[in-house]
Image (spheres, rainbow, N blue to C red):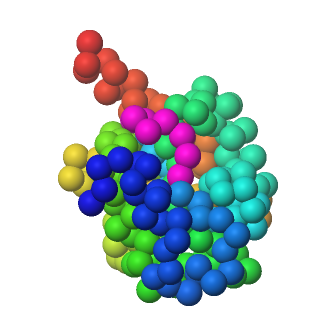
Amino acid sequence: MFETFEELEKSIINCQKCKLCQNRTNIVFGVGNKNADIMFIGEGPGADEDRLGEPFVGKAGKLMNMALEAIGLKREELYIANIVKCRPPGNRNPEADEANTCLNYLRNQVILVKPKIIVLLGSVALQNILGKEYKITASRGNWINQKGIWYMPTWHPAALLRDETKKIDFINDLKQVTSKMQEFEEKEY
């Protein structure tokens, strides 16, 4: 367990624990407010993310940013990370051994951020965080509370690019996140 983001990121930079390291340009550690109440977790970096070293900067990320803006959330207020820190070839889903290798890094990020809410973007994030028994179609839009953290599973923004009808669900799920945050803020006052 690393005590700071800097120590954690430094430990990942030269990671060679799985085969994903062989083709990476950059690790994609995570970005955003390190004290965020809301954390987003995706599956893994794509080509743009690998090139720039930042999560959700490609087409799916731009769509996510537009959705966040539409409901009044700012990307800078959130913390955004992925299940794996290196790009899977051809943008395939991370394999089980690759995800398992990176999960301790992600767990350490969650411990450091201490979010109240984690938005799980797609089935890879959902199943790696909460368990294989969870299915995105059945779980999407439903709150799950585990170990004091509220989880909101929703579509991965890339799915919205393939099926525009999912955009409404995605926006509605994000609206639930902002409503839950308002509940937390009201309880604090």
Foreground residue among 48 and 116: 48
The residue depicted at 55 percent of the width and 46 percent of the height is: 31
Residue 63 in percent (x, y) is at 74, 47
Residue 15 in percent (x, y) is at 49, 74
| Residue 75 location, quadrant | top right
Q: Is residue 159 visible?
A: no
Residue 36 in percent (x, y) is at 43, 36
Q: State the extent of the magenta-drawn residues as a range.
A: 30-37
> Would you place residue 51 above or below residue 131 in this image?
above
Residue 14 in percent (x, y) is at 52, 71
> Which residue sits furthest top?
189
The residue depicted at 72 percent of the width and 38 percent of the height is: 66
> Would you place residue 19 above or below residue 36 in this image?
below
* Residue 156 lies in the magenta stretch: no
Foreground residue among 158 and 134: 158
The residue depicted at 58 percent of the width and 33 percent of the height is: 76
> Would you place residue 182 above or below residue 105 in this image?
above
Left/right of residue 92 with respect to residue 162 in the rendered view: left
Foreground residue among 23 and 188: 23
* Residue 32 lies in the magenta stretch: yes
Quadrant housing the C terminus: top left
The residue depicted at 31 percent of the width and 18 percent of the height is: 186
| Residue 94 location, quadrant | bottom right
Left/right of residue 123 with respect to residue 144 in the rendered view: right
Judged by its main secondary structure, the magenta piece is loop
Q: Is residue 38 visible?
A: yes
How many numbered discs, if any?
Answer: 0
Quadrant housing the N terminus: bottom left
Left/right of residue 3 with respect to residue 156 in the rendered view: left
